[in-house]
Image: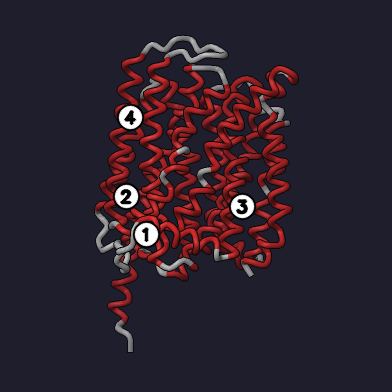
Amino acid sequence: MPDVSVENSTQTSRMGAFARFGAAVGLANLGDGIAVVAWAWIASLLTRDPLWIAILPAALRIPWVFFALPSGILADRMDRKRLIVFCDLIRTLSYGVAGGAMMLSLPLAEPVIDDIGSVSLYWTLLSLGFVIGCAEVARDNAAQSMLPNIVPSESLERANGLLGSIETVGNSMAGPALGAFIVAIFVPLPFLAIAFALLFAALLTASLKGDFKTAEQKTQAWRAELMEGFQFVVGHPMLRVLVLITGFWNFFAEMSVIALVLHIQENLNSGATTYGLILAVGAIGGVVGGIAVAPLMKLFPTGVLAQWMNLAAAPMFLLIAFAPGPITVAAAMFFFYLSGIVWNTLSISYRQRVVPDGFRGRVNSVYRLFSWGMMPLGLIASGAIVRMAEAPLGRDIALTMPFLVAASGVFLLAALSWRPLGRGFR
């Protein structure tokens, strides 16, 4: 007969560990949410060129191309808790330096349409953004690989749904709203606030008890370990489908998110507060999506749910492009984030369940190399599309072109992946 007291003690311990883990995720994503507004908005204070504006936040995403694979090896070789703490401390220091650089550069020169107002500050922020991005790659990979060691397999959807809601509140609701408020008070303040949030996140993660190393001891060369991760993904039909869908979906999503900055400023004649509130409304949709995953899985087959969530972003992009005002954009962002969180929860939970613990970091890194590596390409493509369309179409129409291209791309992506998703989740 099982010892009920031992089972209850184990369950309580797991709940406490997940609560601290979730709180650390929340603080880290609060910082990331402030950064959503801070990087793009500060870029718009240094230049009005859409391509230069897109390149600055892209610096945080480019490391997913160069550092995703090594981060997977680190996550499979190191204690994942210590790796997360180290990365959050690196980001804390970098954001502190960025805030100091901003203060030393005040007052900022008036931004111009085809040049950069403060070249030294721009390149300083660009360099720090790359360092922050590298640390974020390693941190996120380790955290996603570590979750199955905190919660049991049968609870992964629920845990990922809750974490998705927590991440969305911080990353897209509380963070952007707070970022929009404090950037209007004092331009360097968002970077300093992010530094404090990440510091407390590191302390919470450090408080977790237990051994978060993989059981398998690695004796192979790094190249051989990387090949194992590649071979696992390539040899698994459903993982191949999921990585391609997520990569192209992120490409189109990032095109639209960066285009939203100038679209709101110039086409809708609104400021930082409105921008932050629109992202906050979108985040509410993400929270709803995270909570609704489990009930939706009881109502619909997983494959059907994945198919429709993959498609849902396309009409939302069209709605943003032709929106008469900020309220319509906010409504579109609500459903965009809702569908995105549901999709991510289904995809991540599937991957965590089918990948063995000893491979999880490397498989996650291969997965994220493409899925997150497409993000900076989407940011840069968005600025390039606006720049090319501006002369023949006019600036107001050119600013809507990234949304139209993204909508077309998502429609095509959903059509090509409809049958594989239906079969794979079955």
Residue 157 shows in this picture: no
**Vertical position of residue 107 compared to residue 197: above or below:** above
Between the residue at mark 1 and the residue at mark 4, the CA separation in whole angstroms equals: 28 Å
Callout in the foreground (4, 3): 3
Q: Earlier in the sequence, mark 1 or mark 3?
A: 1
Give the CA distance from mark 1 to mark 3: 24 Å
Q: CA distance from mark 1 to mark 2?
A: 10 Å
Residue 218 placement: quadrant: bottom left
Mark 3 highlights which residue?
A: 245
Residue 222 location (% of width, % of height): 36, 56
* Crowding at mark 2 (Cα within 10 Å: few <14, some 14-19, many 20+): many
At label 3, counting other C-alpha atoms closer than 10 Å, the crowd grade (few under 14, some 14-19, many 20 or more) is many
For disc 2, the marked residue is 84
The dot on residue 146 is 1
- Asked whether 237 or 293 is in front, the reply is 237
Give yes or no for contact between labels 1 and 4 (Cβ–Cβ under 8 Å). Answer: no
**Residue type of the residue flagged with mark 1:** Met
- Residue type marked 4: Leu
Q: Does label 4 or label 2 sit earlier along the sequence?
A: 2
* Residue at disc 4, secondary structure: helix
Q: Quick one: quadrant of the N terminus?
A: bottom left
Question: Which amino acid is tagged 3?
Answer: Ile
* Quadrant holding the C terminus: bottom right
> Of circles 1 and 3, which is in front?
3
Identity of the residue furthest to the bottom in this view: 1
Q: Residue at x 61, y 42 (%)?
A: 334
Residue tagged 4: 192
Mark 2 vs mark 3, foreground winner is 3
Q: Are marks 1 and 2 in contact (CB under 8 Å)?
A: yes
Estimate how packed mark 4 is, as few (under 14), some (14 to 19) or many (20 or more) residues with alpha carbons within 10 Å. Answer: some
The residue located at (61%, 46%) in the rendering is 248
